Image: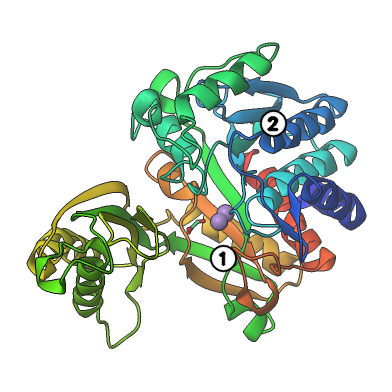
Amino acid sequence: MSGTVAPNAVAAVSEARQWDRLMQMAKLGAIPGDGVNRGCLTELDRQARRLLISWAEGLGLAVSIDVLGNLFLRQEGTEPGLAPVLTGSHMDSQPNGGRFDGIWGVIAGLEAVQALKEAGVATKRPIEVVAWTNEEGSRFAPGCMGSMAYAGYRPPETWDAVTDNEGLTFGAELKKLLELEADLPRRGLGVVDGPAPFAYVEAHIEQGPRLEADGLDIGVVEGIQGSRWFIVEIKGKSDHAGTTPLRLRKDAVQDMLRVIAALNELTQDPDDVLRFTVGRIEVSPNSSNSVAETARFTIDLRHPDKQVLTERGDAIERVVQGALKTCTATVTERFNAAPGTFDPMVPDAVEKAAKAQGLGTLRMASGAFHDAQFMMPLCPTGMIFIPCRGGVSHHPSEYSEPGQLAAGARVLAAVLADLANR
Ligand code: GLV
Ligand code: MN
Ligand code: MN
């Protein structure tokens, strides 16, 4: 079926409509330099959800929401009892983020479904577009909460007490969202309450430089490297900066510097594959003439090889404790997404669709984590990458051209038509 009718659906993808929707979304949380700051479960996130719902309802899609706030837009299949094909991504952004990370995967899903409808392409299986709650993990850490709960990887109440910078909890903010969306039909939570989807495919900007450098259109994603997040909290003692001799201090910042230096040693990698990032530091009392009492910093550690990630990650606690001179420290792990390789079913479908459309492809792994990582154990999963300028992401200057975004949506439309007719 897909061989004959998918070309009509591919042709019905509208570059202008998709771009216009992305730019409408980009207004919700716009920051200088064409960026977006749309934190998860903020009023802006709620407005973005309402906008998406208005488009979906205009298309006659059935909208529903689960206990984690994951939002689903369903196009019924001709055999509605069959497991659906799921596509989508996230609508939250980094605090200093761009206009495409996440949101494009949701808008591309909507565009592909609209194109299928306009081309009169009915599929056997239902197609559901999902907007996962809190992929970024920057307002409430960690990321991928929505997909982790959907996959049964963690119970839905796991993160209720997680706070943002203002001390608001994820649980209270989620409750507020669900109350505001009380008119939406509630659905069960993923595979906790129901069967697994037939397949999951997520469209996303590459967030790296390879496609652009090679002049290629589509990344056929074969897997995702693993990520582990830790919080290190160093406890010392606050004293007067002018009167307290260094030998009597328990200076949390000085011990933090020792700890980070030791972690840099631990994470040395001559091949430059292991990624170690300290992206956030909080010091208290954070005063220039007081010795720091506490220093708290995040670790983001990534590697494609599970063994390397396990060994280096498991060594962090020992290295932290060994590097301290005067203070004490605790190390807490709060995210662990194992590296994985996708079942070939979806990547093969992506490659076939892209080649049929005359697009240049590259088989590649994802350096960023994605909700797809938590779908991988549930069903055949894959991702479609498109180039982004300079490989830049998590920054206002993040950019993909309307034509590149449309090419990705066309591949997605063909892949959905293919998978949803199997
Ligand atoms: C996702 O945003 C990541 O940090 O990889
Ligand atoms: Mn993303
Ligand atoms: Mn991101």
Q: Which residue is mark 2?
A: 46
Farthest residue toward the bottom?
Answer: 270
Q: Which residue is mark 1?
A: 220
Q: Where the C terminus falls, by quadrant?
A: top right
Q: Where the N terminus falls, by quadrant?
A: top right
Q: Residues within 10 Å of mark 2 (few under 14, many from 20)?
A: some
Say what secondary structure mark 2 lies in.
helix
- Determine the residue positioned at 28% across, 59% down: 292
User: Which percent across, then down, holds residue 96?
Assistant: 62, 59
User: Which percent across, then down, holds residue 269?
Assistant: 27, 82
State the colouring used for the structure image: rainbow
- Residue 384, image quadrant: bottom right
Residues at discs 2 and 1 in contact (Cβ within 8 Å): no
Question: Position of 350 compared to 327: left or right?
Answer: right
The answer to whether residue 249 is above or below residue 127 is: below
Amino acid carrying label 1: it is Val
Along the viewing direction, whichever of 197 and 18 lies nearer the viewer: 18
Amino acid carrying label 2: it is Arg
| Label whose residue precedes the other's in the sequence (2 or 1) | 2
